[in-house]
Structures are given as C-alpha cells and as structure tokens.
Amino acid sequence: MSTLKEIANECGFSVATISRVLNRDETLNVPQSTREIIFDTAEKLNYKTKNAKKQTGISVDNGVYRRRSTDLGTKRIGIVEMHSIGELLDDTYYMYLKSNVERMCMDNGFETVTMQFDEETESYKNVGQDVDGIVAIGQFSKRKVDAMAKLTKRVVFLDSSPDAVRFCSVQANYETGVVQGLKYLLEMGHKRIAFVGPSQTPDSTGNAAPEMRRRIFKDFAKRYGDAFEAIYIETNSSGKDAADRIREFVADKKAGKKDKRPTAYFAFNETAALNAMRGLIQSGIQVPEDASVLGFNDTVLATYTQPQLSGIHIYMDEMAKVAINTLKQLFLDETMMPIRVLVPTGLSERESVRKI
C-alpha cells in the first residue's frame, strides 16, 4: 500500500492538500481538475483511506479505488427567458440563443422546460415538476433572480451576470466586439462613424443603465479622437425605430450635407442595423456605395438582406455550450465557486461595408 508522500511525489501536490482531498475536506478550495488528478494517482498507487467511500467520483472495492460513472443521467433543465414570444420575434438574437441552449441540452440527454414568471405569486411555474438546473437567458430583476434561487442553486445566467457572487454566468465580450468593429471601420478608411443605438438599456438586473456598447464606443472615441469623428444617433432600446431616426438625421439641414454625413454607421444590435440600412436607402443613400453599415450579433438574418450585412459575430453556439458545461459541473459539485465566462467575438465581412 502506498503512502501520501508517494502520491505527492507522483502528482506534485503537497501531502496536506492530498490528505484533505482524499478525506473529503469540503472547506478546501481547489479546482475539480486537481481533485481528479489526486484521485487518479491514488487509484494508480492503490492508496486506501477510511474516508474514501465518501469521495465524489471514487468507490473502494477490496481496498482499490475505482472511479464511479460520471454519467449525469436524465436531468430536467428549466429555461427562463426575459422576453415574451412576441418580443423574441422582434429580437431574434435571444431566439437563436435559446435554440442553441435547447440543442445543447438535447445533445447531453437533458430534458428542457420553458418556465414562466407568475407576477402575482412572484414565482416561476415549472410545469408541475422540480428542475435540476436553470439556464436564464437575458436580464432579470432581483426578485426574479431570487425566485429562481428558491427552485435550485444550479442557475447559470446567459448574456447577463446579475449576481456574480452567487451564480455562474456566460456573456459575449462586448468590449472586444466594439473595439474590433471600430478598428475594422478605421482600416477601411472611414473617418466619420455614427453609433446607432440607445443611450440606455436594461442592465443585468433589468434596471436602466448606460448602454454598454455605446459606452465602449464613446471611450474608444475619446482615446482615438484624432483618428475619426464620432456621431451618435439615438434609438429606442430595441433599435426598431432606427429607420425613422436615420431619416430624421439625414433630413436635418446640417447633418444632411453630404460632406457632413457619416461614411459608416455602427449599430448596437442587428435589429438597429437592418432598420438603419432601410432608413438610409429610403433617404436616397445607397449601401455600401454612399455609406457603410456594420451590425452587432450577426444572426442568419444578416445574410437575407440586400446587400448582405457585415457584423460583429457573437458565437451563440459556444456560449450555449459553455453554459451547459458549467451546469454539468454544478451537478457534480454544487459547492464550486461561481465563475463568469466572457466569450470572444468575431467579424463577419460581407457586402454592407466598403473601403473608401
């Protein structure tokens, strides 16, 4: 039979850490990967401890460590959305995000159920059965977050982080996305760039807050003020009124002068980008001949326009994958520390942006 020192020599961790892991010391904060290395080494060296039977993922058979199956079995996952069905049709980003979550659940053999918030009872309806975990898509108020927490501790927020101390979250990295888009437009020769979007949108708790992409755009413009002129065209929080705002902007006597117009429009989401392009064309400004348009989110709708819309791509499939993998880790270890993952963005170059 091997000793703790021999295990330490084999795997490189301290004797104290190995002892606490093998004896299931729940106050010890080490990564799951560290625990698995220690378990594997103990099994390999045929180490025995009286507490081994309690160890997650390990059983003892005649003094030999054997790894128990990590098959999670059938789990019931509640999907909570901030939008109604009608709102989802207006903002397809969240519709596609939900679709990716459902596909990832299916790939892992998990059952899904869409949960609705009851305003009267301030609780979520979970269709008569308990849920093993929740994926919450979008932004939520504190009372809705607390309502989820009453059902399960295994909650992963997707596209927001309302309580990073208590819950795991997965978000697109808007910082890299906006900077990536602006650098692209500058490389294409644009010197007057308009941000199309609201000054405020709901934050992770549902309260009005400065729109993140506009704030990042503004910060970039302050740092590189000599590189380009920043212009701001205000829309509502969804971007659905962007066509009207663009027409008003172009009709304005000062802004309507050809030498004063932006050569590029950077929209805060895809809805705003599609409507901005429509507003420009209705104003007699051709895209991309007279002005370029760059969107954000980049769903399949971007390829249905004429010209096809260039955009900052959010990897919704990867976001969904990370969210479900995080939920799986919570199934194995509910005491794991909350993590916040920022998924990088990409650039989809199509027809709506041209070099000048």
Image (cartoon, rainbow, N blue to C red):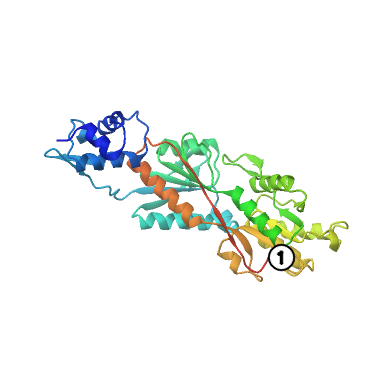
Q: Quadrant of the C terminus?
A: bottom right
Q: Which residue is mark 1?
A: 278
Q: Position of residue 5 (x, y in %)?
A: 23, 32
Q: Quadrant of residue 154?
A: top left
Q: Is residue 246 left or right of residue 258?
A: left
Amino acid type indicated by mark 1: Arg
Residue 2 screen position, x and y as percent: 17, 35
Q: Position of residue 21 (x, y in %)?
A: 29, 33
Give the class, few, some or many, for how many residues have Cα within 10 Å of label 1's Cα (few <14, many ≥20): many
Question: What residue appears at the point 71 percent right and 65 percent down from the top-left corner?
Answer: 278
The quadrant of the rendering that contains the N terminus is: top left
Residue 256: give x, y in percent of width and height. 85, 60
Taking depth in this image into account, of 253 and 144 the one nearest to the observer is 253
The image quarter containing residue 45 is: top left
In this view, which residue lies farthest toward the left? 62
Image point (54%, 42%), residue name = 140
Q: In this rendering, would 182 be left or right of 163?
A: right
| Residue in the foreground of this view, choosing between 75 and 29 | 29
